[in-house]
Image (cartoon, grey):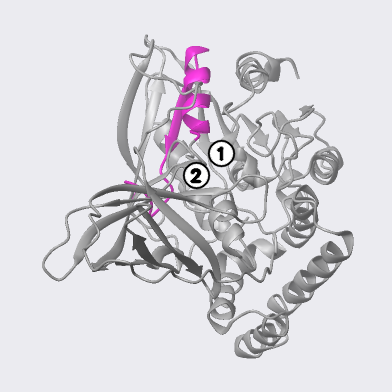
């Protein structure tokens, strides 16, 4: 779920995974050293440095620079290898020994000065009022593939495609993988978590949906995965979309599967991860021909309860003091209460939240950024969305998966809530698996903290992959 008050840690290390921890940290700004020479920087190439965010694992930041023009403007791109971010276009310029970078998408900037003796650019990375020292060194850019990532040739058919979004008419781009032969085969749609994701659900250098699709297709299952609306190759606009709008995108994917002659029309299901595991029950509740759903790290309680639990779990994984955790959770709950208070006008609520954020020491730019997030249609919908309403209406087989190290959607809170909603609705056709030591991405983890995701080599525990494949092909039929 999306960040509430993103510090540099939250924005870079958490936002792509959809987290919400609140962290307000005062950082000192390193002085930029005096220039020792007036010769311009030989800047062309790849430069890399580490942001020390106060955790055990620093964030690696890389920049690729082209040849500057006569005015010092140069083509540039940002890379964050741990998050799988590469080639994000940014603005950069050089003037003698000074380097200036603007990263509008991150609301961040960098100012540095080149030291000709050490060959290092020493400077300051600033984001929404917070600053950290960042030293850049020449390095060799590398594209790392995680050890489980499948590579062609595949023992099945893989086709890129486009299909229409039924309600708004734009096209969604995706990939379908299918076994050789005429079928008919069981089929699934993969639905990613919160935030804009590509069809592989690329996060922190991992491609979980590429791996999952490969595993399932090898087991005889047709898999459709797609880029989220307005992202990668898909059309549409995500800025005003709620979870319910995204559910229509999933319904459109299901509708496309129904047109394919090699798909078993009576055996189409949905596998959702994180927010995708909220969308799956919504779609199955509205479409009675969905045969089954798999909920990977799904929620069974409303958004406020999920965020309350998530914030505390993430901060504990970061070894924050308990009194700080209590204060942070209380502050967030106070903000949520104002955001959803329909008795007040929107402007009144924004003013009240802005006052709370400012009283916590946030700079005005960061306050404005948070107001944009908190009062977005997605966030306001998510806070009050209760998945149990849709889970309770399901009579189809359901697979519930979670890990004991999941700090974003905790097994302790969510699994029992999902089981209760299904049971109270009269559905006992569910299978629950809680994996010891696995995090939100179903990786073997030490603490479950988000900053571990990118440095764990395993994309998804092989047992999880095997269990899903078996359940879709055999296990659900025994319930």
Mark with earlier residue (1, 2): 2
Q: Give whichever of 324, 258 is nearer the camera.
A: 324
Tag count in the figure?
Answer: 2
The answer to whether one can see residue 374 in this image is yes
Q: Give whichever of 382, 449 is nearer the camera.
A: 449
Residue 391's place in the image compared with 213, above or below, is: below
Mark drawn on residue 454? 1
The answer to whether one can see residue 165 in this image is no
Residue tagged 2:
83
Magenta residues (range): 206-234
Q: Secondary structure at mark 1?
A: helix
Contact between labelled residues 2 and 1, with CB atoms less than 8 Å apart: yes
Whole-number angstrom distance, CA of label 1 to CA of label 2: 6 Å
Q: Quadrant of the N terminus?
A: bottom right
Q: Position of residue 235 (x, y in %)?
A: 33, 53
Q: Position of residue 114 (x, y in %)?
A: 34, 61
Q: Give whichever of 172, 32 is nearer the camera.
A: 32
Q: Using residue 38 as the reference point, say whether residue 313 is left or right of it.
A: right
The crowd level at tag 1 (other Cα within 10 Å; few <14, some 14-19, many 20+) is many
Figure quadrant of residue 385: bottom right
């Amino acid at each position: 779920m999306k960040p509430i008050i993103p510090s540099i840690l939250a924005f870079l290390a958490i936002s792509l995974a959809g987290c919400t921890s609140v962290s307000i940290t005062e950082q000192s700004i390193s002085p930029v050293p005096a220039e020792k020479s007036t010769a311009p920087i030989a800047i062309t190439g790849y430069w890399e440095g580490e942001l020390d965010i106060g955790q055990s694992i620093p964030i690696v930041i890389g920049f690729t620079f082209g040849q500057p023009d006569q005015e010092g403007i140069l083509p540039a791109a940002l890379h964050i290898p741990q998050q799988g971010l590469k080639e994000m276009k940014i603005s950069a310029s050089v003037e003698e020994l000074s380097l200036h970078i603007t990263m509008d998408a991150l609301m961040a900037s960098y100012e540095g000065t080149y030291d000709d003796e050490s060959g290092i650019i020493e400077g300051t990375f600033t984001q929404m009022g917070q600053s950290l020292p960042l030293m850049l060194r020449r390095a060799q850019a590398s594209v790392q593939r995680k050890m489980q990532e499948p590579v062609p040739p595949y023992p099945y058919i893989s086709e890129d495609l486009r299909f229409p979004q039924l309600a708004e008419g734009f096209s969604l781009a995706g990939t379908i993988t299918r076994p050789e032969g005429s079928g008919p085969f069981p089929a699934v749609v993969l639905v990613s978590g919160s935030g804009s994701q590509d069809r592989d659900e690329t996060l922190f250098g991992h491609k979980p949906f590429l791996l999952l699709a490969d595993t399932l297709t090898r087991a005889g299952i047709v898999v459709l995965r797609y880029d989220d609306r307005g992202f990668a190759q898909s059309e549409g606009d995500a800025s005003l979309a709620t979870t319910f709008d995204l559910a229509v995108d999933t319904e459109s994917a299901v509708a496309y599967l129904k047109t394919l002659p090699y798909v078993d029309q009576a055996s189409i299901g949905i596998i959702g991860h994180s927010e995708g595991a909220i969308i799956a029950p919504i779609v199955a509740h509205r479409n009675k021909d969905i045969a089954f759903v798999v909920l990977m790290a799904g929620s069974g309680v409303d958004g406020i309860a999920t965020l309350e639990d998530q914030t505390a779990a993430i901060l504990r994984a970061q070894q924050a003091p308990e009194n700080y955790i209590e204060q942070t959770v209380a502050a967030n709950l106070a903000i949520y209460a104002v955001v959803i208070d329909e008795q007040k006008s929107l402007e009144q609520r924004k003013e009240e939240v802005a006052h709370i954020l400012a009283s916590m020491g946030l700079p005005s730019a960061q306050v404005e950024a948070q107001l944009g997030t908190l009062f977005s249609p997605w966030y306001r919908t998510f806070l009050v969305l209760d998945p149990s309403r849709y889970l309770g209406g399901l009579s189809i087989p359901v697979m519930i998966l979670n890990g004991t190290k999941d700090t974003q959607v905790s097994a302790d809170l969510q699994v029992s809530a999902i089981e209760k909603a299904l049971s109270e609705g009269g559905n006992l056709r569910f299978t629950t698996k809680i994996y010891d030591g696995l995090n939100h991405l179903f990786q073997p983890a030490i603490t479950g903290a988000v900053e571990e995701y990118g440095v764990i080599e395993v994309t998804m525990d092989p047992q999880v992959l095997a269990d899903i494949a078996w359940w879709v092909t055999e296990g659900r039929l025994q319930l």
